[in-house]
Image (cartoon, helix red, strand yellow):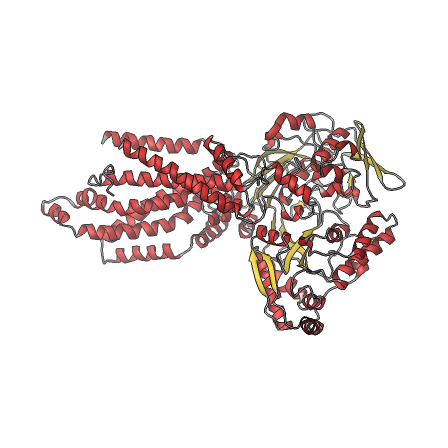
Amino acid sequence: MKRYIGIRIIYLLITLFIISTVTFFLMKALPGTPFDEEKLAQLPQEQKQMILTSYGLDKPVFTQYVNYIKNVAQGDLGTSFFYTGQKVTDIISGRLFPSALIGLQAVLLGLAIGMILGIVAAYRHNTGWDYATMIIAVLGVSIPNFVLAALLQYYVGLKWGLLPVAFWESYPSSILPSIALCVGVIALIARFVRTEMLEVLDQDYVMTAKAKGLGTIRIMFQHVIRNSLISVITILGPIVVNLLTGSLVIENIFGIPGIGSLFVDSIKMNDYSTIMGITLFYSAFYVLVMLIVDLLYGLVDPRIRLASGKG
Amino acid sequence: MKKKKVGLLASLLVVSAMFTGCSFSGSDSKTADSASGQTTSSAGSAKELKLYVENEIKDLDQWKASDDVSFTVLNNVNEGLYRLDLKNEPQPAMAEKADLSEDKLTYTFTLRDNAKWSDGTPVTAQDFKYAWLREMDPKTGTNGYSFIMTDYIVGAAEYAAGGSADQVGIEAKDDKTLVVKLTQPTPYFLRLTSLAPYFPMKEDFVKSKGEGYALGADSMLYNGPYTLSSVDAASGAVLVKNQGYWDAANVKVDKVDLKVIKEKSTALNAYKAGQLDRVLLASSDVNASKSDPGFGTGINFRTTYLQFNLKADGVSNINIRKALEFGFDSKLLADQVLNNGSKAATGLIPDVMSGIDGKSFRETQGDLVGVDAAKAKEYWDQGVKELGKAPKITMLVADTSEVKDVSTFMQSEYKKNLGIDVTIDTKTSKARGQLMDNSNYQMAITAWGADYDDAMTYLDLWANHTPYRGNYENADYDKLINGAKKETDEKKRLDMLLAAEKTLLNDDVVVVPIYFGGYSFLLNDRVQNLEYHPYGNPVDFKYSDVK
C-alpha cells in the first residue's frame, strides 16, 4: 500500500510538471499584457517597455519559464499582476474556503439524498416511488443550476426572506448556493445507484441471502448497497473536484468570493502568475482525489488489489 | 471496525477545523436585517450606506491602480489638493488655496494647517512630491496612467523616459507650500489634482511597509473623509468616518459598506431585500423600474466609437468611411437596444462637457454626426466606384455583452441602409487591444472615458499617430491640438478644439461616435446627495446623508 501511494505521488509530480509546462506556453500565447491596454496605448513605446521590464516580461518566454519553474520548486508561486503585490498562494487560500464549503455541502447533500432516492427507486422498482424518483432525477439533470440559483434567490431570499439574497457574511449565506449546486448531484447519484442496485438485486448471492432467511435491511446494507457503491465512487471523484473548485456562475449569482470566478477573471486579465497557481492547484487536487477514489475501491471491494495494478 | 470509526471521526475533525479556521467576510450576520427588509445599521444610531461595486477591488496602491473600482475606494479614504464637489467643480481639499502665475504656468499650492494623516502627522508638500514622482517613474507607476502628469508638468515626460527627477517642475518649498510648473497653460489642472494619481503619500510609511504596502486596511495611511476598517478584494470593503479629517464636521455618514457584486440581477434582488441603498439597472429592468420613486439616470463622460484603421484596405477610402458614418441610427440604438440611460452620440465630446461662457462644448459645436441613409448609400457607391469593387468590411469588437449588442445592431443597420454584410470579429478585450496595437484591424468598436472635464481629454488622443488611434496623421490637426495646449485665451483655445473635432469626424472621418455612456439606477429614498461624477473619480461619499 505504501509503495503504491509513493509511486502515485511520483506520478503526481510528473503530471504537475507536464501540466505547468503546457499551461505556461499556452498562457504566453494569449494576446495582450496584464496591464490596462487602454491607458498603455497612451504611453510612449519606451515607457511601455520599461513597465514590461520591471515585471520581467521583456525576457524571452523560455527564460521566463525556467525562472518560473525554479521559483515553483522553492514553493513560490509568485505575486499577482491583477491584485498587485498580493502573493498567489494568499489569494488562492483566501478564495478557497467559500468554494470548498459550498462544494462540500453540495456533495454531502447530493450524495445523501441521491443515495436515498436511488435506493428507494431500485427497491420499489416499477412502482410510483420509482417513477417519481426518476422524474426528479430527469428534472435535476435538465434544469441548469444557474436557473435554479436565480429562482432560489428570488423566492427563498427575496420573496420569503428566509435566507440572505447574496453576499458572504455568515453561514446562512452558504445554504442557497449549496442547494443550487447539489440538485444536479442528487439526480446523477440517484440514477447511478438505482441502475447499479437493480443489477445487484438480480445477482445469485442476493437470492442465496434471501434463501438463507436474512432480513431485508441486512441484505440491502450488507450485500446490495455496498456492491452498488463502486460506480458511485467512480463518478464521485470528478463531482468532488468540480464542486470543490468553485462554480463561476453560482459564485457570481450569489456574490461569493470563490475560486471559480478568480480563475476565469485571471485568464481574462492575463494575470499570468494566478493562472499558473490555480492550474497547479486544480491539477494537484484532481490527481489526489483520483488517488483517494482508487484507495476507496479497495475498501469497498477487497477483491480489487491496488498493488497488483488491477482496478 | 473501531479503527474505521476513529478514522472517520478524525476526518470530520479535520474538516471542521479547516472551516472554523476560516471566516466569512462580515463578522456580524445580517440575515435578520435582510429578511425583514430593514436597512438599519448594526450600530443603531450610526448612519450607514450600503453600496456595491461591479468588480473586485483589485488594487489600492495608487501607483498601480487604474480602474474605477479602486478609484472609488481610494478617493474616499485619501484626498488630493482639490476634490470635486456635487456640481463636479474642484474645491480646495488638502490645499487651502492655489495661486496661479500670470503666465498661467506656475501653480503655488498652500496646504491647510489641519491636513493630517490618520496617524496624526501632518500632510506635507513633500508627500505630494514623493507620490507624484513615483507615479511618473515607470518602475513604480505601472498603471499606465503617468500621462495624466507627464503631459503637463515640466520635465516629467523626460523623467518618465529615464531622465532625472531633479528636472521635474515640482518643488516642496516648505512643509506647506508646493510649487508646480506646467509646460503649457492647463485650465483644468485643478481638476486633475483631484484624481487618485495626484494623491499624496507618506514616504516613511510606504517604505516601512515595503512590498506589503496597500495590501490591507492596516497597511495604508489615510487622509480622506474615511478610513478603511476592512478590505477584501473579492467581497468588498468597509469604510468608516475619519475623525481626524480636516472637514470631519461635514461628513454625515459614519460607515459605508461596499460590496462586490458582479451580477446586475443579484444586485437588484439585494436592493429589493434592503441589503443595498443603490443599484444600477440592466437594460431589461429599466422599463419596469421607471415608476419607482427611486429611479434615476446619470451620464458618464464616456464615448463609445468606431475607430477606423486608415491604412487598412477598404476603409482607407474616405467615402467608404463616410458611408459607415452615416449608415446607422444611433438614436434607435441608444433608446431601443441599450435603453440604460445612454444617449445617441452627436459628436465625440459628450453632452454637458464644459465649454466656455456657461455653454457646453456640445452646445457650441452642434451635431456633427447622425443617420442619413440616402447620403450614406451615395457615399458607399462613390467609394465602390473609386476602389473598383465593393470592399469587405470587418468590425473588430470585444466580447462584452453590451458591445455585442451594439455591433449586431450596426451590422443590421448597414445591411438595411447600405446593403452590405459586415463581418463581426469578436475577440477578448486583450486580444482586441493587441490587434489594434499591431494595426491588424479594419475598424473596431472602442471607447474612451474622460479623465477630466475638458474636450482635450478626447481630442489629444489622435495626436499620437499610433495604430491604436487608426494611424492617423494630419499636420493641421496636430497644429490645432498643440495650439490649443499653448493658447491662454479661452475663446481662441475653444475654437481650435471645435475645429479639431470637426476635422476628426467630418473632414477626415477617423472615428465615428456611436453613443454617450449613461446608466439607470434605483436609489433608496432615505439617501441624499449621493452623486456620481461623470468623469475622474467615480463618487464622493463625503457629501452624502442618510435620513
Q: Nearer the viewer, residue B544 or B24?
A: B24
Q: In the image, B31: left or right of B334?
A: left
Which residue ends up furthest to the left in the rendered image?
A212
Q: In the image, B489: left or right of B404?
A: right
Q: What is the total number of numbered labels drawn onto the structure image?
A: 0
Q: Which of A198 and B422 is in front in this view?
A: B422
**Rendering coords of residue A273 (x, y %):** 52, 39
**Rendering coords of residue B505 (x, y %):** 74, 61
**Rendering coords of residue B394 (x, y %):** 60, 63
Quarter in which the C terminus of chain A is drawn: top left
Q: Residue at x 72, y 72 (%)?
A: B375
Quadrant in the rendering for residue B174: top right
Quarter in which the N terminus of chain A is drawn: top left
Q: In the image, A71: left or right of A141?
A: right
**Rendering coords of residue B541 (x, y %):** 68, 41
Q: Residue at x 28, y 58 (%)?
A: A131
Residue A188 seen: yes
Q: In the image, A268: left or right of B443?
A: left
